[in-house]
Image (cartoon, rainbow, N blue to C red):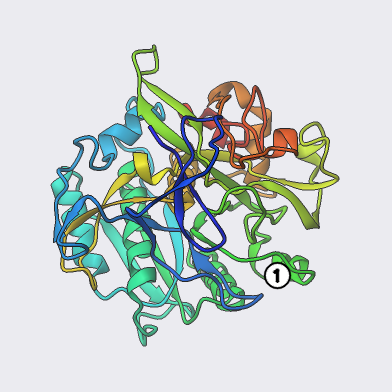
Amino acid sequence: MLLASISAAGLVFGVGPAGASAAAPTPVANVVRSCAAPVAPGFASCMALMRTDLVQGGRTASAITPNALPSGFGPADLQSAYGLTGISGSAGSGETVGIVDAFDNPNIASDLATYRSTFGLPAANFTKVNENGAASPLPSTDVGWGEEESLDVDMVSAICPNCHILLVEASSATIADLGASVNTAVALGAKFVSNSYGGSESASETTSDTQFYQHSGVAVTASSGDSGFGVQYPAASQFVTAVGGTSLARASNARGWSETAWSGAGSGCSADESKPAFQSNVATNCARRGEADVSAVADPNTGVAVADTFGTGGTFFVFGGTSVASPIIASVFALAGTPTAGTFPNSYSYAHTSSLNDVTSGTNTRRCRSGVLCKAGVGWDGPTGNGTPNGTGAFHA
């Protein structure tokens, strides 16, 4: 199976089996970014990648069968892959998972209902507000960010169907508006907030940390990026759980699944964030914050089923990107229960590495010269962090 990585120009390339290098990457035309790259520092892009080869007539009609490979993993697949099938049927009840995105998707509630009914999930407990926490006025619409919203709410549904989903729509794709939306989600009771977006680092990001992302007792997750080796913000924040990406496949092992580092997963050493204490024994070639902390499926070639009708004319599509991984991890945190007051949950996995699936192969750059920061191996590594969920044991204090 080919892994997908993305160049600065936004093209997707096949790079061969995990860990292998190719003489010349071959463009693959079946994956497109939902959102354009950030226009300037202080702006962010969503991390959703959509497969175009699994829809009939371009983006105009659905061609996937839920839960059937290769057309997108569904809830049963993801719960099986991450050791969540034995979780209590009431797990997540009373918990609110916040989703922060920019702009409005007017079809989000009906598409969410389609996803959940298709996969036999109960009706959603769903709320949508603007960045000020009000039901109206909602921001202007945007198809790409609308796809991201559909992806995010479906992944929360897949992992924590009993959770209340709170979608906070920022007025724009600036870190200022998106960060304000994180504050709103927390103010409205979310103890878990997923951010499937990112932009470049800047010297001012530590100010953004304290303004928007420093919420003790709240699990704030963020996508590590879809362009391979390199750091993005807010995943780089020392207060955020940076979520990397993997390629996920069925296997004939005891787990029933295998994972390698996805070649598009962001990772590296922050230029601006101090090294948190919980990373004192990892990323020893990085004097600052290392990215990522944990990971989940992100490769669009092993992507997930998503219901989306806004601007597409279809119903179901297959998505990848670390946009998939961030809401998955936020929802696993929710299954584990409310975080301990006064703690930052991005530290939790470092104390519970035995409760994770260690991902030990794959790389996110053709020539990995930074060792553990760009190449998967035993223990912590940049592209996959400490590993992927194996139940909820690594997601509580």
Image-quadrant location for residue 138: bottom left
Task: Point out the image quarter for the N terminus.
Answer: top left
Q: Position of residue 126 (x, y in %)?
A: 30, 62
Q: Which residue, given by chain and number where applicable, does mark 1 sit on?
A: 208
Task: Point out the image quarter for the C terminus.
Answer: top right
Q: Is residue 221 visible?
A: no
Q: Position of residue 314 (x, y in %)?
A: 16, 63
Task: Name the amino acid, label 1.
Answer: Ser
Q: Position of residue 244 (x, y in %)?
A: 55, 44
Left or right of 61 in this view: 392: right
Left or right of 237 in this view: 77: left
Residue at image location 64% in from the left, 48% down from the top = 229
Image-quadrant location for residue 394: top right
Q: Position of residue 152 (x, y in %)?
A: 38, 56
Residue at image location 36% in from the left, 42% down from the top = 301
In the image, residue 123 sits, relative to residue 70, either above or below, namely below
Q: Nearer the viewer, residue 23 or 197?
A: 23
Q: Dot 1: within a 10 Å radius of its alpha carbon, few (fewer than 14), some, or many (20 or more) residues? A: many
Q: Nearer the viewer, residue 247 or 324?
A: 247
Residue at image location 19% in from the left, 48% down from the top = 122
Left or right of 271 in this view: 330: left
In the image, residue 86 sits, relative to residue 301, either above or below, namely above
Q: Is residue 18 visible?
A: yes
In the image, residue 254 sits, relative to residue 74, either above or below, namely above
